[in-house]
Amino acid sequence: MPVRNELISNLTTWDAPTLAKLHDQYYPAIYRYVFVRLGDEAAAQDIASETFLRLINAIQSKTPPHTSVRGWLFGTATHLIGDYVRRAPREQARIEDDHRAEFSTEMQVEKRLQFGAIRAAMRHLTPEQEQVLLLRFGNGFPLEETAALMGKSVNAVKVLQFRATQALRKLMQQDHVEQTD
């Protein structure tokens, strides 16, 4: 859901209710985006929180987002993920999955296996392929917003998305064959 212009204009006046509304609206999506990229619950919480702290700092320094708060937040989170990956080797990222009690043990095991297989396959994609899949399918960004966030044309994003889905499909099929051998 695009942020209305009134929310953007309220950001320039340090409107606490608007900030709270933005946090409630976007924190879960930012957290999921970071968690899927890193597979580390603590890092995802830290980076999602830092993203909103940077929004507050941008407002205080009179440089708030001008057009898309969502795009600004995801762009900031993407940069923070890059910083994190440069500081901590990717191999050290651990996968933690916090399931609710309503799921049976069998369902929890199946979800963990599926998530782990997808995470493992996505590690073999290029960073751009991983990012386009997470933005488009993990967070539901439209093509135009994904293109703007990635600094690419809509057609380039379409091609990148197609290649990423094909590569992921191939990797998942190879993994399935290896597991059944």
Image: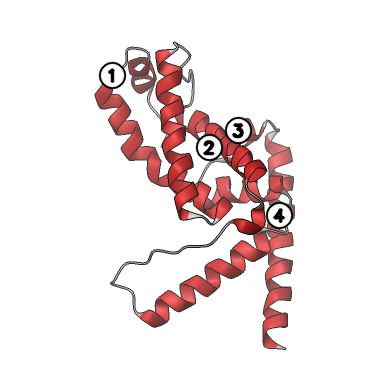
User: Measured from the top left, where is residue 17 in percent x and y?
Assistant: 25, 26
Q: Amino acid at mark 2?
A: Ala
How far apart are the alpha carbons under marks 3 and 1?
A: 26 Å
Mark closest to the chain's N terminus, 1 or 2:
1
Q: Which residue is the site of mark 4?
A: 164
How far apart are the alpha carbons under marks 3 and 4?
A: 17 Å
37 horizontally vs 9: left or right: right
Res. 15 mark: 1
> 154 or 130: which is nearer to us?
130
- Is residue 93 positioned above or below 63 on the image? below
Q: Amino acid at mark 4?
A: Ala
Tell me the mark number nearer the camera, choosing from 3 and 1.
Answer: 1
The image quadrant of residue 16 is top left
User: Measured from the top left, where is residue 90 in percent x and y?
Assistant: 65, 53
- Is residue 43 positioned above or below 100 on the image? above
Quadrant for the N terminus in the image: top left
Q: Evaluate whether residue 71 shows in this view.
A: yes
Res. 77 mark: 2
Mark closest to the chain's N terminus, 4 or 2:
2
90 horizontally vs 75: left or right: right
Q: Which residue is the site of mark 3?
A: 149
The image quadrant of residue 50 is top left
Other-residue count near label 2 (Cα within 10 Å), few / some / many at <14 / 14–19 / ≥20: many
